[in-house]
Image (cartoon, grey):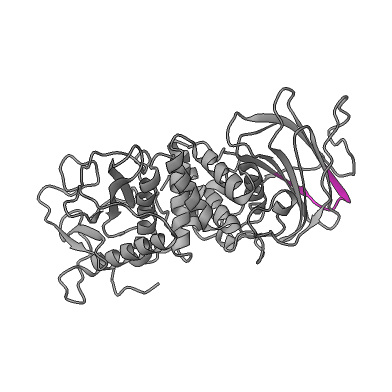
Amino acid sequence: MRALALTLLLGAGCDSARPPHEVPGDMAGRLVAAVRPTEPSAPLPRFEPGETVESTVSPGGRFRLHFSRSGPNAVAGADADGSGIPDSVEAAARVYDRVAAFYAGLGYRLPSEDTAGGDGKFDVYLVDFALRADGAYRLDGCLGADTDCTGHILQENDFAGYSYGSYEEAVATLASHEFFHAVQAVYHPGLGSVAGEGSAVWATERFEPALDDLDHFSSAYLERPDRSLVLDPDGPAQAFSYGASLFFQFLGERFGDGLIRSFWEESVRSPTARWPVLLDTCLRRDWSTDFDTAFTEFAQWNLSTGSRWQAGQGYARGAGYAELVLAPKTLPVDEPSVRVAPAAVRYFEVAGGAGTVSVGFQPREGDETVALHLVAAARSGTAVLRVVQVKGPGPLTLQLPAQDATSVSVAVVDGRHEGTGRYGRLCMVPSATATPCGEEPGEEPQESEEPESSKGCQAGPGAGGGGLLLAAGLWRLRRRRLGSSTR
């Protein structure tokens, strides 16, 4: 990324907590009736009465950036090239042009002309968020019913006190995130925070992999994989929506960028469908798989993140992601009531060294058992030695050779995209047995698949079943921990 010759007061060091991009409760997709921050009735942040607001058009002609030189929303005033426009504003304008061209190159539709701003250009307002956030996309209106919508962006005016490494890094992160909300609004702005924020963080990663936004927010998912991915969080848990970017990153790496674009295109054809249903439709139609299968493979990729990353397996850049949080247990294990929600995973870990570790999960009587999976991985240091998986319906049992393993990771995966939580009894014993939970009259446990040695993940679209087994130790924890909020 080209360095800026700007002297700007950014946060000192990388350890400062970065706030969410949007203020919690002011998520993308909120209709604000075309009220702009130049008007006194606009919600905060806005320009103050008496501030002189100027504007400039981006070199590509698509964007108009509004700014002030003095007052609470003043931008950095340096003008090294003597153009009459502050260098910081010119730098931001160039970044927005690059972002729009990049998304168009991926095949996305860009927003229609913005008539609310007066000249058809997309408006960006540089205002002070006072460290509460650093940007927002706000809807002005829609030409169709919940589609072909337009709006404007609010961007932090100077990023003073924020934890970005440079002004250009800050603008690239914010512009790529918020303008992808504008792209989403062309298709369907109301799919919820997980789809909206998750795919926007993914878009930033896709725009410029060197930006660490996805790395930064990965802990919001990897620390709470037991949360349902298909339910929008609220309150302090809203950061989970940003952490959901890890799922969209998985989809992009596993199936290609076209899947995520197809998902947004499908939202126009099926405007009342929930986002996981749209995704399931695309996976079935174009990739010969489904949400359940893809989510289960995602759960396996996440077994190897942070310090457990190994090149060539799973995420390409997983060394920078947070490390998955697993619940430590001591063999033998007998957990009588383990709850797993739709599109969620319960992870556990025990010591290796036993010749065989047998694992069983007995669903509670009366609970449906479709799209239920049991996965176990034998590890040695960062390497995943082998993975065994078994899926429902019915009680699940597997046996995993673990004599050469230092640890064994176990995942109970619910691959449904709707429904209520399910309960079951989880048992693990350090011996080879078909009944790790003891005899269950009248029940015939599922046979586990043969162990598959670690050999990387298949990358071709449409691979299912055993082809979705992970094999390797992935990623490394990045330098920043997540704050408390959404983006």
On the picture, is 292 further left or further right than 451? Answer: left
Image location of residue 322, percent across then percent down: 57, 55
Give the side of residue 210 with respect to residue 332, left or right. left
Given residues 102 and 112, the one toward you in this image is 112
Of all residues, the one furthest to the left in this rendering is 50
- What segment carries the magenta color? 348-359
Is 38 or 288 nearer to us in this picture? Answer: 288
Task: Measuring from the top left, give residue 476's x and y in whole percent.
Answer: 60, 61
**Residue 168 in view in this figure:** yes
Residue 251 % position (x, y):
56, 53
Residue shown at the point (29%, 75%) measured from the top left: 5
64 lies above or below 437: below
Q: Is 49 drawn above or below residue 107 in the view shown?
A: above
Seen as rendered, the residue at the extreme top is 366
Compared to residue 295, the image places residue 453 above or below, namely below
Q: Residue at x 50, y 40 (%)?
A: 275
Which image quadrant is residue 102 in? bottom left
Query: Does the magenta segment cover residue 353?
Result: yes
Which quadrant of the structure image shows residue 68? bottom left
Q: Main secondary structure of the magenta part?
A: strand
- Residue at image coords 48%, 36%: 273
